[in-house]
């Protein structure tokens, strides 16, 4: 063990002041804020329809259409999110603050597109398609959790910055 005192750990922030200003003034932040809960609502409806099909064997068409709609929302939020990242961080994807979220997003997209491919080609049975959709949805839930965690960190950072700015000198 070393007797030298450790340097105080400096908190790691998601955004610089300039990035936060760009984030807060960007229309893409609002768009993401609207699309994310809409996508989650579509996900919940679709999840019910998929589970209904797997349990009762009815509603294949409704479940399929709902998964395709969910996939459109996913792709839309990915494109608008990439634009948001460009505006805020200066690059379309894989900015340091959201690197792992972006990496995992590609897994989510791959699973959704694998589902679309399976439906298009008839490569899987209807049950297998629904299980693939559930795998895509499980990955989506993990990815959504990653982004919610970052949203929480950003809010904590904002409140910490506000407290620091208001602290007497």
Image (tube, helix red, strand yellow):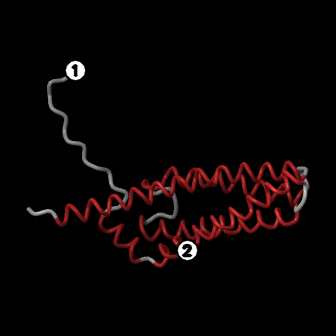
Please tell me the numbered disc located at residue 34: 2
Residue, far left: 169
On the rendered image, what quadrant is the C terminus found in? Answer: bottom left
Element type at mark 1: loop
The answer to whether residue 25 is above or below residue 66 is: below
Check disc 1 and report the residue beneath it.
Answer: 1
Q: Position of residue 128 (x, y in %)?
A: 85, 48
- Quarter of the figure that contains the N terminus: top left
Q: Nearer the viewer, mark 2 or mark 1?
A: 2
Local SS, label 2: helix
Q: Earlier in the sequence, mark 2 or mark 1?
A: 1
Q: Residue 15: image x %, image y %?
A: 35, 61
Residue 69, by quadrant, is bottom right
Residue under the point 60% across and 55% down: 105
Q: Is residue 25 left or right of residue 125?
A: left
Number of numbered labels in the structure image: 2
Q: Nearer the viewer, residue 35 or 19?
A: 35
Q: Position of residue 150 (x, y in %)?
A: 45, 56
């Amino acid at each position: 063990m070393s007797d030298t005192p450790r340097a105080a750990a400096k908190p790691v922030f998601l955004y610089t002041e300039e990035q936060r200003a760009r984030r807060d003034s960007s229309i893409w932040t609002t768009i993401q804020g609207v699309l994310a809960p809409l996508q989650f609502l579509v996900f919940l409806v679709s999840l019910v329809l998929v589970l209904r099909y797997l349990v009762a064997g009815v509603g294949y068409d409704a479940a399929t259409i709902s998964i395709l709609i969910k996939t459109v929302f996913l792709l839309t939020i990915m494109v608008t999110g990439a634009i948001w990242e460009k505006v805020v961080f200066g690059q379309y994807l894989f900015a340091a603050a959201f690197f792992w979220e972006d990496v995992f997003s590609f897994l989510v997209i791959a699973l959704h597109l694998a589902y679309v491919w399976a439906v298009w080609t008839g490569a899987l049975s209807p049950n297998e398609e629904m299980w693939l959709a559930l795998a895509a949805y499980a990955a989506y839930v993990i990815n959504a959790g990653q982004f919610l965690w970052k949203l929480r960190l950003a809010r904590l950072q904002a409140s910490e910055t506000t407290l620091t700015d208001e602290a007497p000198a």
